[in-house]
Image (cartoon, helix red, strand yellow):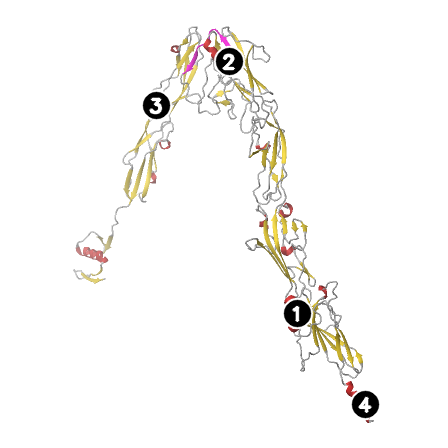
Amino acid sequence: MKFALAFTALASAANNQAPVISLNLADCTYTGCMHPQGSGRTAAHGLEAKTQADGKSDNSFADECAVSQNHLPSDPGCQEPEASAYDHHDGAIDVTTSYTLFVSSGPKENPTPKHSTPSSIDLSVRGEWIIKYDASDKDGNEAETLTFALILNDEVAPACSGNIPGCHTGADGYRTYLENGNLEIELCDATDLAAGMTWSPVSQTNTNDLYDGSLDASNSIFSSGLKQQGSGAAISGSTSQVPSNLYKGITSALTLNYEITSEDFAGIFGTQNKNNVFTKTGEVVLQDTTSPVITSPAWPAAFECGFSPAAVDYTTDYTDCYDDWGATTKSTVSVKVNDAAITSSFSVFGDAGFYVNGATKPADVTLVYDVSDTHGNPAQTVSKTIALSDTLAPTLYITKSDGHTNGESTAEGDVCAHGGMTTGATDGDSTYTDHCTAFTTKDGHTTYTHSSDETNVDTSATMEDETQIQHSAGYAADYNFIVELMQEGTGYRCEDACASTTTTVEWHSSCSSGASGAHFDMRTPGTYYLKYSCTDGTHSTTACRTFINVDKTRPIISVIDAANQNDGTYVVEASRDNNYVDAGATCSDMIDGNISEDVEVSGDVVNMAAVGTYKITYNCQDSAEQTAIAAVRTVVVKDTTCPTCTLTGDATKSVEASFPYEDEGSSCTDTLDGELTPYVVGLDAVNVEETGVYVITYTATDAAQNDAAQCDQTAPTRTVTVEDNLKPVISLQYRGQQLMAESTSSVNGWVIGAVASAVSGVALLGYAATRKATVATSVPV
């Protein structure tokens, strides 16, 4: 029995020994496995390491590893430890496992304290887990609880996603993402940019986190911005987009710096116990790389040789999707003509570059167009060859050295009797394609001389103004004139803008086409025809003069100093004192010679005192009773002399303010009208109540409306100065009496004197009605 009890007691003693729980961590292959208790994260989260009295660690363990979302395919990731219990009596026994989640951080959630007891551990939940292991043997002996802390961390930062430069490459509309992390935005995308499309780092970019998923500015800490390159100054509003004003008005590539930052929600479970941060920096380049396109002008079928084409016929523009809307000044398309650069216009006048000199057919003109847009992108060169044609006949002049009159059919008073000059298709000038057969016809052969100040007329070799000329038979001296009319530059002139010309001058039996040749015999009366024919090798122009050779020619009247004005009139200044003296006229006859003494004068008597137009007629008759063609001088009496005015009195006057001003006036006279009533300018402005300087002008207008003040001379003026030189006067009323400052008698005078001395003292006056003496008390001050 004792043995049995002893055995029982022994057995009982042996069953009091607790089983032992052990954890199998041998299969833990992930990085950082088997951290002992007291790790940094465990300590930070409140799982303190415990040490027994004997210095040995208790049954608490801790470890950290990445949540399952962050594992690579080759990494098995976190694993829950395998626990086993052993009892020396019962052998292997079951282990009871319990789970507590103390801190949790779900996707897109910050770490939050939590105390939940799920039935199992979830290795995909970022947080801090506590696993407790308990076991009891059959005798009820409990093993020492074993505690294992497992921190599921997230140390992987968000990664590239969305339209982030450097995260991917390739074109996206008007954006091109480069491998170096830069973004190129094509300015020359008129469809998108004109519609207001912009690159928005916030709205168009996002990152992806293995645990938190897609992150952007709407659900996480996400920032982006642009800065000016170089200065580093932030661009206003760039956190939402590249401001639209940056797209316009630039002439070269504009580079901006960008920075994009994205944070996940790892918090204390992230690297260094902070959110994991994704950062991307680089450049955004705004540029125009698209070439412009030159538009074709409305080219004519041909250019007329020798004339300047209208700019609209050869200038052009270009289209460019950026320059057309980018608020920049568009470049000018350059044009080269036969490899020669031009600006706004070019000429195709006759020279070796634009026609074959001396040939009958002009060469073609090649136009070459080039342009680069404001960003330096060159357009494809456009070239066009245009025929250079010659469709106009030469211009033949036989009555004037130069028939150009800038678009008018009259030249310096000479009327073209051929129905007007024919105007060719030119740019800004008139070129006549037909010769002028006759200006104002004169009988005889007097040369019409043009004034030297008249432009567009060659006065060095003026030609005869007639196409029908009367020749005096037998008058040898007259034949020299005929010879001159057969010489180029004296009797004719032929011009062609495209090619050189050749002119033949021959006598014919008539001016009709195909008339036979003839010979001029100055001694034989009759009608002769001198025909001019000018050719440029392709076209011809003809003109003809008629010579009437008679044995009795009329005398010829030449008016001396016929006119002193371009319009053929003789203008004289009106006068009451002078008389008109006429220069007269000469008369000559082939036979009688100088018969100027036979000149008869008729017509108007010129009255120099009466403005108007007068006509004086001259005529004469030779011994053969041949009457000359009358000549007329037109005399115009004009009054262009201004009246003169003279001041009465001095040119400068002074008047005391508030005193009336009486002006002395002036007198005005005119050489023709005599005494005139002057009118005064500025007199009403004289204000004697306002000090200052006033200027009065005296002028007059004669019957011809010549105003003295408007002529070259200076109308007289008077300067009136209003001054204030008088001192003011003080008056004083006392007991109904007027006290004047000048009075020194009686009591009042004494008082006033005392008051006047107040600058050095104050006089106190006492006046008693019952006393006749004035009592004064002086108090020094």
The label nearer to you, 3 versus 1, is 1
The label nearer to you, 4 versus 3, is 4
Q: Which residue is mark 4?
A: 7
> Residue 525: x percent and y percent?
50, 6
> Residue 473: x percent and y percent?
48, 7
Q: Is residue 272 above or below residue 406?
A: below
For numbered disc 2, what is the local secondary structure?
strand
The label nearer to you, 4 versus 1, is 4
Mark 3 or mark 1: name the one nearer the start of the chain. Answer: 1
For numbered disc 1, what is the local secondary structure?
strand
Under mark 4, the amino acid is Phe
Q: Which residue is mark 1?
A: 112
For numbered disc 4, what is the local secondary structure?
helix
On the question of residue 744 being in view, the answer is yes
> Residue 530: x percent and y percent?
53, 13
Under mark 3, the amino acid is Ser
Identify which residue is drawn at 17% across, 55% down.
746
Identify which residue is drawn at 77% across, 76% down.
84
Q: CA distance from mark 4 to mark 3?
A: 176 Å
Q: CA distance from mark 2 to mark 3?
A: 43 Å
Q: Which residues are magenta?
A: 545-559
Q: Which residue is mark 3?
A: 575
Q: Which residue is mark 2?
A: 468
The label nearer to you, 4 versus 2, is 4
